[in-house]
Amino acid sequence: MADDKKAKKDAAPDTAEGEGEKKGSNLGLVIGIIAGIVVLQTALAYLLIPKPVDEAAIAARREEDSLRVIAEAATRMGAVTSDAPIEALVNIAGTDGERLLKATIILEYEEKNAQLGNELRRRVPRYRDLMMSHLSNLTLMEVTEPGAQDKIRGDLLRMINATLPPQMGEVQDVLFREFIVQ
């Protein structure tokens, strides 16, 4: 019996020490869980909270993209009707036949639209008539002023596109091969 009491006394301090170790290990586990939750919440907050939007940077990026598209369009060359140029030699209005304008144009259209190219070539006589009518109505001042070719180009482009069926497509540009005022 004495040995049993002694065994219980010896066992009692071990149990107290064991319980202390369990409490300490539980405390580390609880702190670890809390730390994990804090880290997880911080990561979620970082990912889910919207960042401040820099409107100026977005506007600058959009402008840069639009300028790039414009530059690409300006440098891209479509198919042309160089095998079927449209020529006109007309008297300049108001000069009593003393001054002439000779102009030759070719038409630029979207390269993938071969049907439009064929139609433009077929309509060359109509476009020559249109061009002669328009150019013969211009005065010497309208033909020689700065920017005259650009204005004439725009007028011809508008008139030619007006003659095409909508489903056919459009001419993209009128290119001068010759523009001589004599």
Image (tube, rainbow, N blue to C red):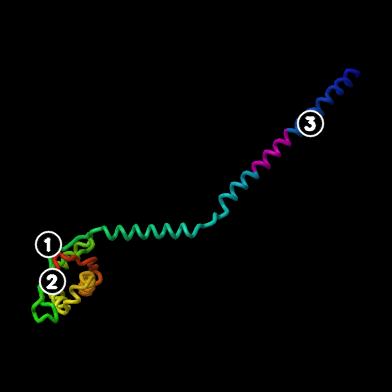
Q: Mark 1 — residue?
A: 83
- Check disc 2 and report its element: helix, strand or loop: strand
- Check disc 3 and report its element: helix, strand or loop: helix
Does label 2 or label 1 sit earlier along the sequence? 1
Which residue appears at 30% of the width and 57% of the height? 72
Q: Residues within 10 Å of mark 3 (few under 14, many from 20)?
A: few
What's the CA distance linking mark 3 and mark 1?
100 Å
What's the CA distance linking mark 2 and mark 1?
24 Å
Pick the residue in front: 45 or 173: 173
Eye-nearest disc, 3 or 1:
1
Q: Mark 3 — residue?
A: 20
- Check disc 1 and report its element: helix, strand or loop: loop
User: Could you tell me residue 22's position as x and y percent?
Assistant: 75, 32
Q: Which residues are magenta?
A: 25-36
User: Could you tell me residue 68's position as x and y percent?
Assistant: 34, 57
**Label number found at residue 140:** none
Q: Report the residue that reaches farthest toward the top.
A: 3
Amino acid at pointer 2: Val
Please identify the quarter of the rendering in which residue 182 is found: bottom left
